[in-house]
Image (tube, helix red, strand yellow):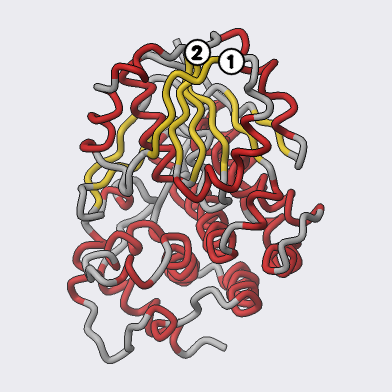
Amino acid sequence: MKQNYLPRYSIGVDCFDAIADVIAPYGKKVSLIYGEKAFAASKDKLLSKLEAFDIVHSEIYGKEASYENIDRLVADKDLKKADLIIAIGGGKCLDVAKTVGDKLGKPVFTVASIASTCAAVTKIAILHNEDGSFKEIYRLKQAPVHCFIDPQIIVNAPSEYFWAGMGDTMAKHVECVFSAKNDVLDFESEYGRTISALCYEPILEKGVKAYEDVKHHKVSEEVEDVIKSIIIATGSVSLSVDPAYNSAVAHALYYGMTVREWMERKHLHGEIVSYGTLIQLLVDHQYEELRRVYDFNKAVSLPVCLKDLDLEQSDPLDDILDAAVINPELEHVPYPVTKKMLREAIDELEDYK
């Protein structure tokens, strides 16, 4: 039997008005797991809507999406009393809370404080070691029940998260279409591949204006549409397609880049992935789409060359490319992607105008 879970969400500056009705069927005792800044930005609006509920547990998730933080929360006696969990924060916080809910068998509701990834709606958690290095992808039994998105909170967060989120989201479409090429897809994967266009076209069309509005802390139609691309459209693809179609070259190259341990300290995930999207389009000779994405990246200052990621063309990049070509993200692609192909695409991009 197949089961498909698509995101349920409320979006708008008044989205918390719906929270009592949405969570009430799941119980009265609430646990709040949050990031410190995210909670500070949302608590006045949120807590006023939870007055009829008993908040039996309230705690910062920690600083990393690690098993150490997950195990600490799972063992918390007050949290165990809760009927449900409300998670408030960015991807790491949400992934911790989702995993805690999974382990304790408690429904999780999410409040997205930034628009950087689709973590608020997906059935996976990206877990790290305490030093921040990647550990594994944890697969959940259930997706979050409902996601609440207040765009005013998002536009008041640092704009670079929205900026990087656009880069990461556009890769979802490019990678999904590429990795599914030549395959006969079942309904769910075809559905996901089809709607992946919503991760791409709205950002190309509205992303420049949306990013300018975010930088000025302004909620606009363009901002809301791009937020939905980043969180809802990308999450819908992730929840629908066979996992083999969720990533390809762009993310494999991202993981390769992270062998330089300073890379993630200096650059955001989606920022690095957006560079990998250009490389993937070159590898696959998609020059028309390359022009569109390159021009968009230039317009919003996402990376278009090695220098933008503090690398030089004279660098052999052997460690990065060796790690990229053996990354699991390249296990299901329409043809073998080699180190030579990646290097040639990187050099071609350096000369692209």
Out of 167 and 219, give the one closest to the viewer. 219
Residue 185 in view: no
Q: Quadrant of residue 131?
A: bottom left
Which of the labelled discs sits on residue 294, or is there none?
none
The residue at the point 39 percent across, 45 percent down is 92
The residue indicated by pointer 1 is 53
Asked which quadrant contains residue 33, the reply is top left
Q: Position of residue 296 (x, y in %)?
A: 64, 72
**50 relative position to 220: left or right:** left
Placement of 260 over or under 235, stated as above or below = below
Residue nearer the viewer, 161 or 158: 158
Task: State how many labels appear.
Answer: 2
What's the residue type where badge 1 is placed? Phe
Q: Where residue 325 appears, x then y in whole percent?
A: 25, 61
Query: Of helix, strand and loop, which one carries label 2?
Result: strand
* Residue 46 in which image quadrant: top right
Q: Are marks 2 and 1 in contact (CB under 8 Å)?
A: yes
Q: Residue at x 27, y 64 (%)?
A: 258
Q: Earlier in the sequence, mark 2 or mark 1?
A: 2
Q: Where in the figure is residue 257, as x and y percent of width and height?
A: 29, 68
Q: Against 18, is 34 above or below?
A: below
Mark 2 Cα shell of 10 Å, populated few (<14), some (14-19), many (≥20): some
Q: Amino acid at mark 2?
A: Lys
Q: Which mark is residue 29?
A: 2
What residue do we see at 23% from left, 29% from top? 71
Q: What is the C-alpha distance between the residues marked 2 and 1?
A: 6 Å
